[in-house]
Image (tube, rainbow, N blue to C red):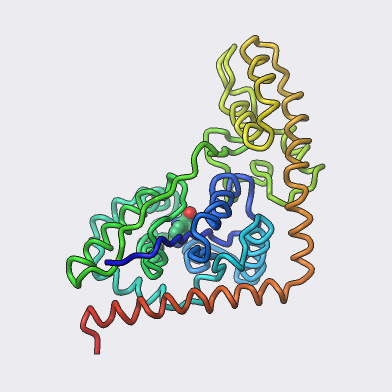
Amino acid sequence: MKTTPRVLSGIQPTGKLHLGNYLGALKNWVAMQDEFPHECYYCIVDLHAVTAPYKPEQFKQNVFDTALDFLAAGLNPEKSAIFIQSHVTEHVELMWLLNTLAPLGLLERMTQFKDKKKQRQAEAVNAGLFNYPVLMAADILIYKATAVPVGDDQLQHLELTRELARKFNHAFGETFPEPEARLTKGARIMSLTNPDNKMSKSDVEKSYVTLDEEPDRIKSKLKKAVTDTGAAGETGPGARNLLTILGVIHPASVPDFEKQAKQGTIRYSDLKTHLAEKLAEYLGPFRARRAELASKPKEVWDLLDTGKEKAAKIAQATLVEVKEKMGFV
Ligand code: TRP
């Protein structure tokens, strides 16, 4: 089977993206555009987002915010297809077909599903949450993607995707390559207020820094960041998280703080002030680009339309092939 190296990934439109989204995912997506020119498919997975409670009147703004963040971060519509998942309806049709190959037992073992089930009342656990990984598999397989940049929390879903590809190929003939995960290395950014957890939008506002955060707000959020959770003489997870961030955005200033930490002379307030400054500088160009794009909403929506056209072409061809192989009339 001839396969084109191809990349697909997605992020849920739950509002503005934060530093964890950027360093843990988007940054890598941007880099992959040069590795796989014209074969990157990046989508805003709005159909996944509605598996959680959300406000319909805010949904459009959330999608728009995510698109602005994608573009401001450097996703380039000339190199990549940037689009909204629900605009390419073939994803959902393929999901249905893949559902018929997906063993219940496997879906029940998905950690993310089990966690959500635990967090919610039984009646709030909808079937969409259960089938969430099958839709993700369809997102990937509809483009016959070979590489999927994701965080390690998505590895299990990717393994399921590979399993579904194998099952389909076995039952109906070679069709899908088995996509490989491309883990983003070394930048797992934790919550500022609860550094044992990943930085997350569903957490309180002061726990994350959005990509367009104003310098003043960056400063005040960092000021409140938790740093004292380690044992005496040790750098706790909060302080380590700040050093991780600094290591990515301004590595040159890390050794000094590391040394002070070892000697027990580090003043976390200095680290926070310094990091706030560097972070404001680092995010400055991003903020400017984002503001400019925000002033031209029509251009942004048009770009998403162009992305959709590009994506739909591939998705339609795959779906025709799949239905033929499955014997549909
Ligand atoms: N489930 C992913 C997450 O929450 C988002 C996602 C949906 C995705 N479809 C995808 C990621 C396809 C990669 C490929 O992070």
Q: Which corner quadrant holds the C terminus?
A: bottom left
Q: In this orientation, which residue lies closer to the viewer: 97 or 313? A: 313
Instruction: Pick whichever, 85 or 118, lies toward us.
Output: 85
Q: Position of residue 108 (x, y in %)?
A: 29, 55
Looking at the image, which residue is at 60% across and 71% down?
A: 56
Q: Going by the image, does 320 lie left or right of 8?
A: left
* Image spot of residue 78 (x, y percent): 61, 68
What residue appears at the point 37 percent right and 66 percent down from the top-left corner?
Answer: 144
| Location of residue 300 (image quadrant) | bottom right
Foreground: 192 or 242? 242
Residue 288 makes an appearance in the image:
yes
Q: Is residue 89 above or below residue 210?
A: below
- Most extreme residue toward the left, as rendered? 171
Q: Position of residue 311 (x, y in %)?
A: 49, 74
Tell me: 219 left or right of 44: right
* The image quarter in which residue 77 lies: bottom right
Q: Name the residue rendered at 26%, 55% in the picture.
A: 106
Residue 173 % position (x, y): 20, 71
Is 97 placed above or below 273 here?
below
In this rendering, position of residue 166 left or right of residue 95 = left
Q: Residue at x 54, y 60 (%)?
A: 12
Q: Residue 126, can we see it?
A: no
The residue nearer to you, when weighing 48 against 329, is 329
